[in-house]
Image (tube, rainbow, N blue to C red):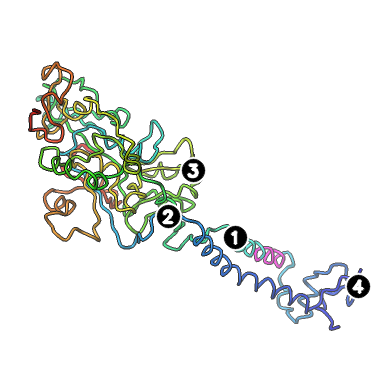
Amino acid sequence: MRAGLPCCTRENEPERKSRWNIRRCLERRGMTRLLKMPPQIIRLVLLTIGIVCVYFTARFFLTPQSFGQYGHYRADALQDIASRQPYWAGKAACVACHPDHAAKLASGEHKTLSCETCHGPGRAHVERPDEKLPKLNMSLCVRCHEASPSRPSWLHQIKVQNHYTGSLCTECHVPHQPNEVPP
Amino acid sequence: MSQTITRRAVLKNLAGIVGGILAMPAARTCKAAVQNALASSPAPTGYDPFKHKWLMALDVDRCIGCGLCVEACCEENGVPEGHWRTWIERYVIKKPDPASGKARGETIVDSPDGGKKGFPPLLIPKEDILKSFFVPKLCNLCDHSPCTQVCPVGATFDAPDGAVLVDGKYCIGCGFCIQACPYGCRFLNPETHTAEKCNLCYHRITRGLKPACVEICPSQARVFGDLKNPVPDMENDPLRQFIAKNKVEELKPSLGTGPRVAYAGLDEVVR
């Protein structure tokens, strides 16, 4: 068997007490210049090197793999954030099955409205057409058309109390085509 | 028992450690690849964040203050009660006292529940009002976002497509970003204890849908589009039309944050 590192072998150095005698180690390797440094400094340097090694090892294991792929963040976060399911179905989903209503809406004043603006979230209805959307409440009309000095002048505004004392807006207005009068 | 440390043994161990360290990245890549292949992520496929650049445009003159956008946002994103990712402010500028020699009187701003349920009637008599208007607010999606700069862990970031996002799994909830945002667009979610804000409905725009607030807005006060993929026909591109027709401004330009939210019809008093 070949002799081990002289400074590290207890058998070869019966006289030494410590296995890791830095001074002996360096002497054997002819690195006597380093010995001019006080031993506490050498220990400090070794400790620093050790800490740096531990830091890089820990960083390697603790940093998520996709971190830094696009920048100083986890690139997988984009996927995570995008994986939430949409709540509102979107006008295109409504138009796909109800082109007649969509055409009617597009010809009137309410053409800028999305279907779900008034009808409410329609995702469940898109997935399961048997599930009907709830009946609409007239408070929706008032929510946008009640007169207010803060509202822009292009918007058709009414003072509900002076406008009509009946119960339903749809008695006189067609929501899909507000300019029309119901038959 | 003799404790012999031979050169051979030391070298063997060292080689093992170095080999292990070198093999680790390869092993992790393989593991990630297998995980990706096996797990079916509900995230939409085929979305490349480098091929889009989103811009939100808000027209103050079109906003009617119905608050449907705020409601839509809260429902879409499960925003906790008492917090808002987007909100509407009602500005009321009173007539000035002629003796003061000022152009405007007092400015009063309110936003009850973020405007989520609409606005109650104004208590200020109409004769005293010089003008009044609604301003929709949301994350300004800064190009040089202060919130990203202060995040100590890299949990909030500027995505390549212009969205400023929060990585909920990585956020430590320190709240630095909430204080750094000059527009007050962030809050700490009381349930998850992580920072939250408008993310442009990232799960919708990656699926080709509009953000919830844009979808629901009845008056087209909110226009949303992709600068890298404009509609070929200029007439039908709402975003380019918006920029061409209006005098476009941004909020707090002096801060140099470079917002990706463009406003039209802003008054000087709006901050």
B170 vs A135, left or right, is: right
Check the residue under mark 4 and report the chain it is in.
Answer: A
Can you say which quadrant of the picture contains the N terminus of chain B? bottom right
Residue at (13, 33) in percent of width and height: A152
Check the residue under mark 2 and report the chain it is in.
Answer: A
Name the amino acid, label 2: Gln
**What residue is disc 2 on?**
A79
Q: Nearer the viewer, mark 3 or mark 2?
A: 2
Query: What segment carries the magenta color?
Result: A41-49
Residue at (59, 60) in percent of width and height: A61
Which is more N-terminal, label 1 or label 2? 1
Q: CA distance from mark 1 to mark 4?
A: 42 Å
Camera-side residue: B83 or A176?
A176
**Label placed on residue A15:** 4
Q: Secondary structure at mark 2?
A: helix
Is B86 rendered above or below residue B1? above
Q: CA distance from mark 3 to mark 1?
A: 23 Å
**What residue is disc 1 on?**
A61
Residue A82 seen: yes
**Label placed on residue A162:** none
**What residue is disc 3 on?**
B174
Q: Are marks 3 and 1 in contact (CB under 8 Å)?
A: no
Q: Are marks 4 and 2 in contact (CB under 8 Å)?
A: no
Q: Secondary structure at mark 4?
A: loop
Is A39 rendered above or below residue B180? below
